[in-house]
Image (cartoon, rainbow, N blue to C red):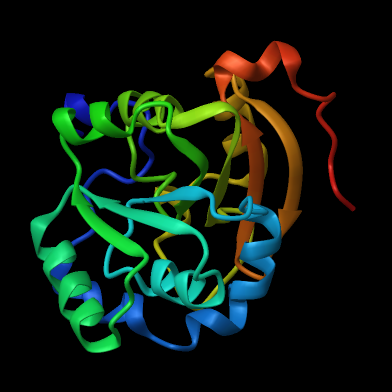
Amino acid sequence: MDPHRHGARQPERFDPKKAAALDDPSRFDYLPVPEILSLLDIPREGLWVDFGAGTGAYARAIARSRPDAAVVALDEQPAMLDLLKAALDRERLANIKPVLSGPRELASLRGRADRVLALNVFHEIADASLEDLASLLKTGGKAVFIDWNASVDRPVGPPKDHVFSAAEGRLRLERSGWSILAQSAFPYHYALVAARPADASAAPRPRRDP
């Protein structure tokens, strides 16, 4: 594995040639937008970041449901952002800003986000990227990590050995200083709501949702 990907479970980045799978409408059946919105709990007129947005299927769906909130769709692959920009031209969504991830762009967003969504990227991102994600949050901000569950048999998604179980994901975040506020499950995914490491001392006692 590339040493710059230390901490990631999947050995390589998502291949943009497979991008069509990200816009498959069946995804919304097993990862419903209303449930993700409930986990995000975006403040009125808040700013949230879709960290590793890909084609922006969920950023666009959430933006339609929450037109008051601004979203920065962040991705490190220009090919993915080109697909997102084409979709935005078609759909005319004004509250999404596609941004190519880099040191300057991350610095401009540091400490500004009320919420960060990391959807299907936790197994791909390195420990350094996890630190970048934390830096985007305001004091009191929260991140929602939703990722494929290695403990679940499923007909879609990466191989089991390329992703974490819910317990492994939780442990990885806690070792990085995050405070887990809530944990829940989808048919093929787990969800972890977490306070950024800098806020851990002020966070409520971690709990597990039934």
Give the quadrant of residue 55: bottom left
Q: Residue at x 40, y 56 (%)?
A: 71
Q: Residue at x 67, y 38 (%)?
A: 167
Tell me: residue 168, above or below residue 27: above
Give the quadrant of residue 196: top right
Extreme-right residue of the structure: 210
Q: Quadrant of the N terminus?
A: top left
Q: Is residue 39 left or right of residue 45?
A: right
Residue in the foreground of this view, choosing between 1 and 22? 22
Tell me: residue 138, above or below residue 49: above
Across and down, in percent, residue 19 comes to 23, 74
Q: Is residue 41 left or right of residue 78?
A: right
Q: What is the count of numbered marks? A: 0
Tell me: residue 188, above or below residue 130: below
Give the quadrant of residue 94: bottom left
Residue in the foreground of this view, choosing between 183 and 42? 42
**Residue 102 appears in the picture as rendered:** yes
Q: Residue at x 68, y 55 (%)?
A: 39
Across and down, in percent, residue 104 comes to 15, 29
Q: Residue at x 52, y 44 (%)?
A: 164
